[in-house]
Amino acid sequence: MSARQRMLFMAWACLACGIANAQAPNTLTPQEKAQGWKLLFNGRNLDGWHSYLQKTPGKDWSVHDGSIELQRGRTGRDEDFADLVTDGEYADFDLKLEWRMTPCADSGVMFYVNESPKYAQTYETGPEMQIADLACTKPDSRVLNERSGDLFDLISSPVEWVNQAPQWNRFEIVADHGHLQFFQNGHKVLDTSLWTDEWKKLVASTKFKAWPDFGTFRKGHVSLQGTEDKGTTPIRLQFRDIKLREL
């Protein structure tokens, strides 16, 4: 075997080893289990999830190829694509997940959602880490505070570290006793504090001032947004590898 052939073989072997050792989605390593991580999605069904103010997931939500999938058009019954929420509620946590979508779609991950008939929508109480396609979704991806990775309508990330559809993206939300951090594809895109005087002034300067309880709850549900009708149809969103560690 020539030197070049040996180099090529070693490169192939390293690649094969990496593929073999890559962690499968919707699984936890022994180290993650020891650290207290738990899967919020088992990769097979929607156990542990329901649509907001409903007992079960709306019919536009399903599981496909190991992902939670929303497929919808621009019209339909609101209850069919109502935002998906966890059965459980969480206070201080580290949340990780992956998402992808069809071009120009729009969604978000909300947290501290208070589920009550008092509130018609999840976003009346829960802050949102925005999902929007790269320079495509109108108007969101072209408006500061409404781009992927932003704290929606409140704080904009300095750089859009988002992969263009239909590539996978990874979000991480760390909420630790009011200290909030967002990470998009491994890059920190937000670092702020909740419930301070500055936070209250910020909220009061936006549309969220119409909902006095927005951003006030210190424990709540995690939510995947399904109510946006942007993008090419059929609109398709996928979420997987959803894991959470309580802090």
Image (cartoon, rainbow, N blue to C red):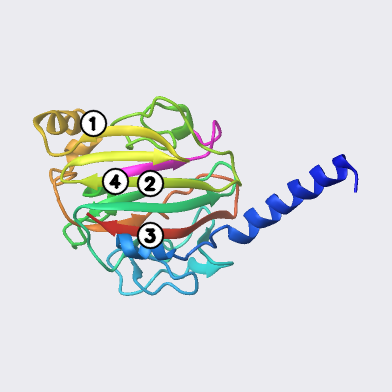
Three-letter residue code for mark 4 = Val
Q: Residue 80 placed where, x, y %?
A: 43, 66
- Disc 3 to disc 4, how far (Cα)? 12 Å
Badges 2 and 4: C-beta atoms under 8 Å apart? yes
What residue did someone put label 1 on? 206
Q: Using a 10 Å C-alpha cutoff, classify the residue at mark 4 as few (fewer than 14 neighbours), some (14 to 19) or many (20 or more).
A: many
- Tag 1's secondary structure? loop
Horizontal side of 112 relative to 223 (left or right) equals: left
Residue at 20 percent across and 56 percent down: it is 119
- Disc 4 to disc 1, how far (Cα)? 23 Å
What residue did someone put label 4 on? 174
What residue did someone put label 3 on? 243
Badges 4 and 1: C-beta atoms under 8 Å apart? no
For residue 130: magenta?
yes
Residue at 51 percent across and 69 percent down: it is 63
What residue did someone put label 2 on? 172
